Image: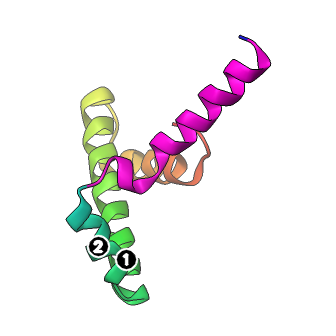
Amino acid sequence: MSSSAHTDFAAASQADLRTENFLEPRLVELYRAATPEKKLAMVAQLNRTLQGLKAVQLAADRPELSDEQRRIELRRWWLADWD
């Protein structure tokens, strides 16, 4: 890929990652209008949802683990920088 093509691709990719490109306009409005406390509560809820989904995946993928072992694996996953 040429340098200019790479630059064009990178710019287009960055533009596609902007919130407005993949969220409903009404959601963007709501997020922008939310207080910092409400935004933090939304992030906390998203984190709980993500952890719940990962816990279900762990239970399905590793049925031999005890509940305590699954909790340990979930914590290890949550604190790691890999998936």
- In the rendered structure, the answer to whether residue 17 lies left or right of residue 58 reads right
- Residue at 26% over, 75% down: 30
Secondary structure mainly formed by the magenta segment: helix
In reply to whether residue 12 is colored magenta, the answer given is yes
Q: Is residue 11 above or below residue 47?
A: above
- Residue at 57% over, 54% down: 79
Circle 2 residues within 10 Å: few <14, some 14–19, many ≥20: few
In front of the other: 65 or 17: 17
Q: Is residue 46 above or below residue 34?
A: above
Secondary structure category for the residue under label 1: helix
- Residue at 33% over, 73% down: 31
In front of the other: 32 or 61: 32
Q: Which residue is mark 2?
A: 29
In front of the other: 31 or 82: 31
- In the rendered structure, the answer to whether residue 75 lies left or right of residue 29 reads right
Asked if labels 2 and 1 touch by Cβ distance under 8 angstroms, the answer is yes
* Residue 37, position as x, y percentages in the image: 39, 88
Residue type beneath disc 1: Arg
